[in-house]
Amino acid sequence: MKVVTCTAPVNIAVIKYWGKRNEELILPINSSLSVTLHQDQLKTTTSIAASRDFAEDRIWLNGKEENIQHPRLQTCLREVRRLARKRRNDAEEDTVSRILNYKVHICSVNNFPTAAGLASSAAGYACLVYTLAKLYSVEGELSEIARQGSGSACRSMYGGFVQWVMGEMEDGRDSLAQQVEAETHWPELRILVLVASAEKKHVGSTSGMQTSVQTSPLLKFRAESVVPERMKDMIEAIKKKDFEAFGQLTMKDSNQFHATCLDTYPPIFYLNRVSQEIISLVHRYNAHYGRTKVAYSFDAGPNAVIFTLEPTVDEFVELVTCCFPPESNGDPFLKGLPVNPTSLSQDLLSAAGSDQCPGGVRYIIVTQPGPGPSQSQDLSLDLLGSDGLPKRSA
Amino acid sequence: MKVVTCTAPVNIAVIKYWGKRNEELILPINSSLSVTLHQDQLKTTTSIAASRDFAEDRIWLNGKEENIQHPRLQTCLREVRRLARKRRNDAEEDTVSRILNYKVHICSVNNFPTAAGLASSAAGYACLVYTLAKLYSVEGELSEIARQGSGSACRSMYGGFVQWVMGEMEDGRDSLAQQVEAETHWPELRILVLVASAEKKHVGSTSGMQTSVQTSPLLKFRAESVVPERMKDMIEAIKKKDFEAFGQLTMKDSNQFHATCLDTYPPIFYLNRVSQEIISLVHRYNAHYGRTKVAYSFDAGPNAVIFTLEPTVDEFVELVTCCFPPESNGDPFLKGLPVNPTSLSQDLLSAAGSDQCPGGVRYIIVTQPGPGPSQSQDLSLDLLGSDGLPKRSA
């Protein structure tokens, strides 16, 4: 039995992906760009074992066996195996060609609650594809396959700042992720994930973007006429480490994505009252300082992702804590990188403070840009035991 | 002393006006279309007296004296007086030329609470211009002047279904309101104003649309590329009394207007949690019946305006009452046209019902399309006494 264990990161888009031009191949209607979050705070771990003793392919996600026949899962398995056959050295009858005939057991866990509403499918499919590739010793470009698991998963195949170039070809060969800058490029950048208390279940992103593509005139215009320029501007802002430009563009693009959701028929609302309060708080905070010190971005749910620079973290976290007093729920309110308690000036409080909304933010994860997927050499992290079944802890 | 008293209606846009191409002349970036609401439920009453004994022009709004120097007020006064001079018969030295030299006292009241957040400036400026015109015996097109008081006021100069053609000329001479169909055209049409409990003060429409014009790429696209076709489709739907088309277009256009507010930087939110619940309720209700039986529209605030046909009123009002149980506040929950209590089928309740949101809707005004401004012949309705000052009741 061969076991390989890898980890992969979550990413947060600052130029948003919303809408496919090809549902089957997951080809987007516009390019997008994301920041890869550090795996110290948020990651998926996946172990895959191959053995001639396995009777069938099986998969366990967060401790629960799931249906391996899921079409996108099957696509990823089929495509990595196809690549393994194609890229391996035909001359030698090696390990790879042997285990390519074995069934696999896949076990995957997140180190963050799925309930948090963080896009776990991106990290999950990136990790699946990366781990399969390691198992079969496949090198090179893999984002095309990860994309077919979950569109945004292709961006989780790299660390730092990553663009997903939409491509033009019908078969999707040129719809790939590319690193724009490495995770070390902008060391001061910090990311706060403000997990909002969700009042209700939201429209899933797959069906949501389908409806948007079919019904929103504004989405089509955005994809064709707004995003291309924004991609250029965002890459430039990142390369220059220009937080003013980066932050403003991030906020504008998040807002425009949610605007196209509202232009969808029937309309889709992902921002709730807490999200609106956070948006308002960020603008008041920036207005107080006369520049963009923090920026928000929201995906298909109410959680806020805040971008800022290291010197601003303590104060902004204090302000959020003040506007959304934590309701004790047994969990710590602050997770991840350390934050120092600080006191807020009366000036700031009267300019940016608001009516308190207790419990509106459940907790905050403090993190930073991080590296792409990697293989673990620590056998103790394997999620599958010697019997090929998930360990107790997995 | 000559006193004239007139009334004018509120109108609700179903193709929205948002954004000026000329702030001074109030020229819009797109045409718009509205339904004039019946004055039995919602109206402004204005009395204007002219007397040689008045020392200066004065104005009282809803019982409080306001500054007559307000620029838009001055524009309306100046323009109607200019028209009176131009259109009168120069040969005769008549009453008009005499009172044109007198100062005026203006007194105006709404029969609905201003706090309700219903666009009172449209009815107010329409009534001002109409009453001034009657005072000075000016006949003919007046919407160009009303437009310069408040853009949407031009549409309150007519009853029924009214379009505001954006026009092309620099001086705004062709930016006028026109009746599309009279108030008698679609006798089954009903309008419910759901006054939502507002949590906070909203961005005013004048400054809101300025920011949108300056910052929203989607608004520009909407005005240039979406609205022209929608105007045609809406006029056709009204002429055919096609509620399916009318309702869908009304909802889509309301949503797109709010989408452009969200695409504004900083973003503007007019829809609150109650608005979102009403939107969701309408879509569930229509989905239950498999067709568009009710439609919503929201202006620059959280109140919902519901369009439906007479046979649907009782049931939908019952459903709203069920989802938003009235919190007794001394006021009746239902105002306006009579509604018959009805019982909801279990089918409908399980398909369209939701978590109850007590007090979310403060009250409902039931009304229908109505006529344009008119002069009152009933002297007892004059708001100004024989001393030229507001009566007690005004």
Image (spheres, coloured by chain):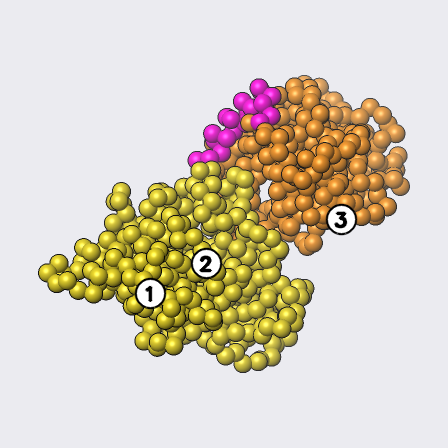
Chain colours: A orange, B yellow
Q: Which residues are magenta?
A: A224-244
| Circles 1, 2 touching at the beta carbon (< 8 Å) | no
The crowding category of the residue bearing disc 3, from other C-alpha atoms within 10 Å (few below 14, some 14 to 19, many at least 20), is some
Task: Please state the chain letter of the residue tagged with numbered disc 2 in the rendered image.
Answer: B
Q: Residue furthest left?
A: B91
Tell us which disc is closer to us: 3 or 2: 2
The crowding category of the residue bearing disc 2, from other C-alpha atoms within 10 Å (few below 14, some 14 to 19, many at least 20), is few
- Vertical comparison of A18 with B335: above or below: above
Q: Identity of the amino acid at label 1?
A: Ala
| Circles 3, 1 touching at the beta carbon (< 8 Å) | no
Q: Identity of the amino acid at label 2?
A: Glu
Secondary structure character of the magenta stretch overall = helix
Q: Position of residue B350 (x, y in %)?
A: 64, 69
Q: Position of residue B234 (x, y in %)?
A: 36, 59
Disc 3 to disc 2, how far (Cα)? 45 Å
Q: Position of residue B54 (x, y in %)?
A: 34, 60
Q: Identity of the amino acid at label 3?
A: Gly
Specify whether residue A127 is painted magenta.
no
Asked if residue A287 shows in the view, the reply is yes
Q: Position of residue B78 (x, y in %)?
A: 29, 52
Which residue is at the front of the view, A11 or A70?
A11
Task: Please state the chain letter of the residue tagged with numbered disc 1 in the rendered image.
Answer: B
Residue at mark 3 shares a chain with residue at mark 1: no
Q: Which residue is mark 2?
A: B65
Q: Which residue is mark 1?
A: B49
Disc 1 to disc 2, how far (Cα)? 15 Å
Which residue is at the front of the view, B122 or B231?
B122
Q: Which residue is mark 3?
A: A359
Which numbered circle lies on residue B232?
Answer: none
